[in-house]
Image (cartoon, rainbow, N blue to C red):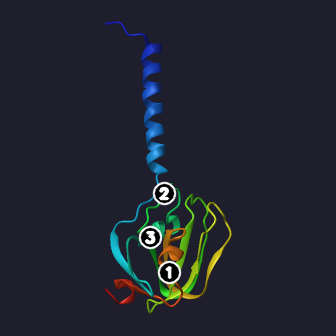
């Protein structure tokens, strides 16, 4: 058999390029939290139930919902910042506008930053000690009447 070395090299380079492209796509894919859990918020309008991803590792907490193009109603991400502390977030590399719900260690909502600006590096502060932050799609707080002082039911706060 005779092989054209240039043709073989050309094919090999093509395969290598394809492998590198796929590898880079996988490496840059958003980090997904390891588990989903139910979370309830008791409001004046009733109980609202969400399915939340738990951001438990440092990488998950740093990445959060970055790079995601959509977030369904009723879904969210819960960040645990134990112990309770002043928390600062931003929207860098986050394409979906969010409501950030800052929650105290006792499970009461401290503050809500509504309709955050996608891709912004502006710092969004808890404005007081918070144990956790719940990120949900923008408009959720208004839609369900979620307000500071409402109670969050989840094992993180010793409830549910």
Residue nearest the viewer, comparing 78 with 152: 152
Secondary element at image label 3: strand
Residues at circles 2 and 3 in contact by the CB criterion of under 8 Å: no
Neighbor class of circle 2 (other Cα within 10 Å; few <14, some 14-19, many 20+) is few
What is the number of callouts on the image? 3
Percent position of residue 123, x then y: 66, 73
CA distance separating discs 2 and 1 = 22 Å
Residue nearest the viewer, comparing 144 with 55: 144
Q: Which residue is mark 3?
A: 77
CA distance separating discs 2 and 3 = 13 Å
Q: Residue at x 47, y 56 (%)?
A: 30
Q: Is 19 rendered above or below residue 43?
A: above
Could you tell which of marks 2 and 3 lies nearer the N-terminus? 2
Secondary element at image label 1: loop
Residues at circles 2 and 1 in contact by the CB criterion of under 8 Å: no
Percent position of residue 54, x then y: 39, 72
For the C terminus, the quadrant is: bottom left
Q: Which residue is mark 1?
A: 145
Q: Residue at x 50, y 56 (%)?
A: 68
Percent position of residue 41, x then y: 41, 82
Furthest toward the right, the residue is: 122
Q: Which residue is mark 2?
A: 70
Could you tell which of marks 2 and 1 lies nearer the N-terminus? 2
């Amino acid at each position: 058999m005779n092989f054209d070395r240039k043709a073989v090299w050309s094919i090999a380079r093509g395969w290598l390029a394809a492998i590198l492209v796929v590898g880079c796509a996988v490496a840059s894919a958003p980090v997904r939290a390891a588990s989903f859990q139910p979370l309830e918020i008791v409001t004046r309008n009733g109980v609202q139930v969400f399915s939340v991803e738990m951001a438990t590792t440092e990488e998950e907490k740093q990445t959060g919902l970055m790079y995601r193009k959509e977030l369904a109603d009723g879904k969210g991400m819960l960040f645990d910042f134990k112990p309770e502390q002043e928390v600062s977030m931003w929207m860098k590399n986050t394409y979906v506008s969010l409501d950030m719900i800052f929650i105290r260690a006792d499970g009461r909502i401290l503050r809500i930053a509504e309709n955050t600006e996608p891709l912004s590096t502006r710092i969004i502060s808890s404005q007081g000690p918070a144990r956790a932050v719940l990120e949900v799609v923008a408009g959720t707080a208004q839609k369900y009447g979620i307000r500071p002082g409402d109670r969050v039911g989840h094992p993180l706060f010793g409830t549910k």
